[in-house]
Image: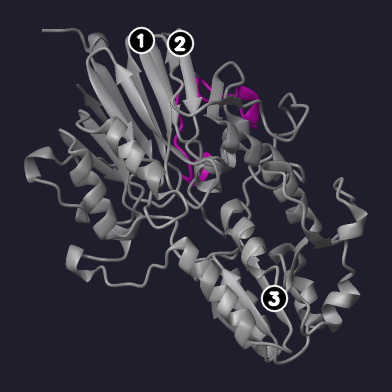
Amino acid sequence: MADSKDKTKIIFHKGTHTIGGTLIEISYKESRIFFDLGAVFDPNIKPNSMDDLLDNKLVSFVDGLYDPMAFNKPIEEKEKSFKNQACFISHAHLDHTSIVNFTNPNIKVYASKDTAKVLEALSLENDFVFPFTKNQEKSKTNIRKIEAVNFDDPIIVGDLKVSLIAVDHDAYGACGFLIESPNMKIAYSGDIRRHGFREESTNDFIRKVRGVDLLITEAVSFSFYKLYEDDLEECLKESELVEKIVKLLKNNNNRQITFNYYPTNFERIRELIRKTKDIRKLVLTSFNAYLLKEVMGIETYYYKINDKAYGLDPSLEISLEELLDDRQKYLWQIDVKRFDIVDKLKEKGLYIHSDAEPLGEYDPFYKVFIGKYEEKNIEVRLVETSGHGKTRDIYQIIKEINPKLLAPIHSFKPERVYYYSDRLLSPSDGDTMLF
């Protein structure tokens, strides 16, 4: 019988039955990799260290993965057998990145060039991923060093080879992985869909991983629908969403219009700027204008939310006072961090919430946030679309990849994914599999 060290070992540490906190380990002999690096979200917990995350079961402990200085209490580690290690991030959303600063500084972290750029820009204010603890050695920036790589360029980690393949998602730079060990090929979808601006990227991913031994796929949409036939919810294409906002602007002349969006969806805001320029001037907060300039090289109108200049062009600044008086010229952003501005808005205005924070009713602040607009007699329009594939699309992606085995994760109800009973794995947190 072959020794277990001659087999590919997969450990589903976290994130099998939650939307967030995915942490999977794949190893072969003296080589191992991890993906992703997020924590389970709990709005009632404000962790300050790895101890807090572990005590509240928001992450799982893994020997050697974390920086010992990220803990308040000494930790006992036993695993010393891996000579080659690396971590990989599929995209910049917090549920896949939040613990990156707590990882062992001796283990490299890889991401696509676009994702690395997004994470560094978002970390400027030190309030995106969990910040370094007081005991850790600080980076020159507020996020640890991330190795930025091109799509499809393989990364060799001892006996393992990992290729980052672009996919369609609502986070700029998103990718899935093709992981190759000496005895098997594994694909990880990351978060994936087909109704965004990069449908062809998802199709390309499918072609490149077709027929793999194991497909580990997200199954977010299955959290909310029991059967394939139940998937009747509206799911706008990103292009349709932009057109819907354009229509709202055209139909609401002489009315104050504000909006918000999720900052990693750079392609949506780029298209909104392009499509609305002849109707209203789109104005971002100074920080979001900085993000757009830093990541995509696009400069746009902005208003200051603090005393920082962010290296922005002064000629593009619009004063908050002018925005508050306006009813016709501007479509402007109200970031959740400047919630106080809502009190100053005109009554009978329109607010467009476009997949912005707070993200939904599971966040206790959501009702407070939306309720404030209603108190001010401001109409709230939710113009949203999922960053995840509909159940029908996920089924189709699985069918086209045609893996020998399937492991659905990243879902409250991954067991709802049916794919030939003899080919379906149903892992739970902590499960180990040998191939």
370 and 347: which is toward the camera: 347
Q: Is residue 79 visible?
A: no
Badge 2 element? strand
Figure check: 283 above or below 419:
below
Q: Which residue is mark 1?
A: 159
Determine whether label 1 and label 2 are within 8 Å by CB: yes
Tell me which segment is drawn in magenta: 54-76
Residue 130 in the image, given as x and y percentages of width and height: 64, 42
Figure check: 93 above or below 360:
above
Give the colour scheme shown.
one colour
How far, Cα to Cα, is label 2 from label 3?
55 Å
x 36%, y 15%: residue: 160
Q: Earlier in the sequence, mark 1 or mark 2?
A: 2
* Mark carried by residue 84: 2
Residue 129 counted in the magenta span: no
Residue 366 in the image, given as x and y percentages of width and height: 58, 72
x 26%, y 68%: residue: 231
* Mark carried by residue 279: 3
Mark nearest the camera among 1 and 2 is 1
Figure check: 266 above or below 236:
above
How far, Cα to Cα, is label 1 from label 3?
56 Å
Q: Earlier in the sequence, mark 1 or mark 3?
A: 1
SS assignment for the magenta stretch, majority: loop
Mark nearest the camera among 1 and 3 is 3
| Residue 10 location, quadrant | top left
